[in-house]
Image (cartoon, helix red, strand yellow):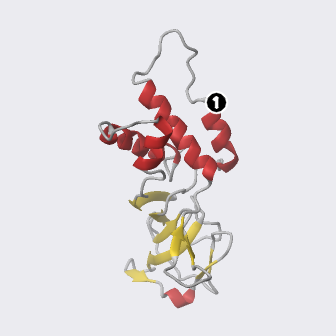
Amino acid sequence: MMQVRVVTPPDPLVTWTDAKAHLRLDSDFEQELVEGYIAAATAWIDGPAGWLGRSIGVQTLELTNCAFGNDALPYGPIVAIETIHYKDAAGIEQVMPDTDYRLVADGSIYAEAWPKVGDDPEAVRVRYVAGYAPREIVPEEGGDPALIPTVPTPIKQAILLLVGQWFVTRQAVNVGNIVNEMPFAVEALLAPYRVWR
């Protein structure tokens, strides 16, 4: 059975400065609280356990499976393959040379031939990087290149809305208001990016 775990989690998708402006705060007094909300909102939507079913922030994941396959790696977009380990027919762990495979645009891994693996539910381990990787922009007039984030703006806005809701409503139920599991605006912003598994 295929399993995916997070090896290196992503950095927060929005900054304290973004949230401070969104909440219209004048001081840094509640920075720690707000950064906790940012981390919680990011974890709620991002990665293998997230509502979106995909990787948003750049993170390292490891897929474990009983065999090689032709399916796309889950929780893309896939940035790079770090390593492929497998247990051969004798049960000895091997590393597949990176010259024997390549990442395809759809997020799958292509190889001329896959090695034979032993009968083990964890015979194959693929460690890979997924998420919206920043792009490097080089100024036309010279100067230092800059990294530009590529996380879609609606996702960042959804995180800011969640942070705002949690900041204003600090308990599970707010008496006198309609109770929603998730604010409609947040769901509307995130829905186009959701992957159903």
Q: Is residue 145 above or below residue 156?
A: below
Residue at 47% x, 47% y: name it.
18
From the viewer's perspective, tell me whether residue 191 is left or right of residue 84.
right
Residue type highlighted by circle 1: Phe
For label 1, the SS is: helix
Query: Where, by quadrant of the figure, is residue 70 drawn?
Result: bottom right
Front in this rendered view, residue 157 or 192? 157
Residue at 51% x, 46% y: name it.
50
Which residue position is annotated with label 1? Answer: 184
Query: Where, by quadrant of the figure, is residue 110 drawn?
Result: bottom right
> Can residue 67 be seen in the rendering of this structure?
no
Most extreme residue toward the top is 176
From the viewer's perspective, tell me whether residue 110 is left or right of residue 34.
right
* Residue 60 % position (x, y): 44, 65
Most extreme residue toward the bottom is 99
Front in this rendered view, residue 152 or 181? 152
* Residue 3 % position (x, y): 48, 57
* Residue 134 % position (x, y): 54, 68
Residue at 59% x, 48% y: name it.
155
